[in-house]
Amino acid sequence: MELHRVTVTPLKSNCYILKSGTDIAVVDPGGDIEKILQRLAKLDGQVKFIIATHYHFDHVGALKELKESVSAPFLIHKNDVPFLDNIIPDQTLTEGDEISLGEETLQVIHTPGHTAGSICLLGDGFILTGDTLFQFSYGRTDYPGGDDFQMQQSLKRLQDILVPGMTVYPGHGLPFVIKS
């Protein structure tokens, strides 16, 4: 799977573009639509999905413009739908859902804490963690829908999933590799 990181918004959110074969998924289009569209134009493929790891504006800010440009379905966890501002998802996600992209599959892992519907996307040898996990910290829990107890439970779950050599692609900051 090809993975491209585009840093967007003044908050330096990571928008990820995943490509397998000719299928493309855009994860967390938080803003700076021009930057996202420029990167997409360099890729030979078609956007099959737009996915949000959670509802915060710095992860969905360019969603409407992107959806108008690429006409792809928008996916988000069902627990974050009530918090969306004038956006209706085409499909809601739940724990264990699988998203097929080309020859590969992304598994949805529900990791509440930062928001009630925060998710991670697990691929072969990598994971996109949104604002659940960063290299040296984890997502805030003091925003609406946040919950510190749930965050601690989610981080414990991730400890069982993360294996040495796996690359973590967080919602902010640089990707990192899990050490032994």
Image (cartoon, rainbow, N blue to C red):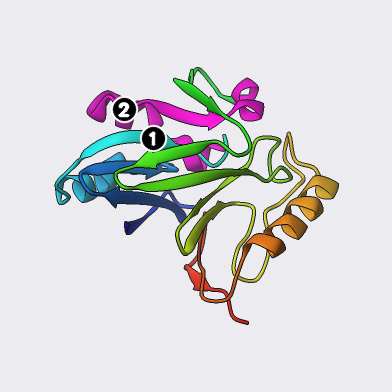
Indicate yes or no whether the magenta region holds residue 178: no
Classify residue 75 as left or right of residue 96.
Answer: left
The structure residue drawn at horizontal position 22% and vertical position 48%, both measured from the top left corner, is 21
On screen, residue 60 versus residue 141, left or right, reads left
Residue 129: image location, x then y, percent: 56, 54
The amino acid at mark 1 is Ile
- What kind of element bears circle 2? loop
> Start and end of the magenta stretch?
56-83
Say which of 62 and 120 sits in front: 120
Q: Residue 116's x, y, as percent?
A: 71, 35
Q: Which residue is mark 1?
A: 50
The image quadrant where one finds the C terminus is: bottom right
The amino acid beneath tag 2 is Ala
Q: Which residue is mark 2?
A: 72
Residue depicted at 82% across the width and 49% down the height: 148
Q: Are marks 1 and 2 in contact (CB under 8 Å)?
A: yes
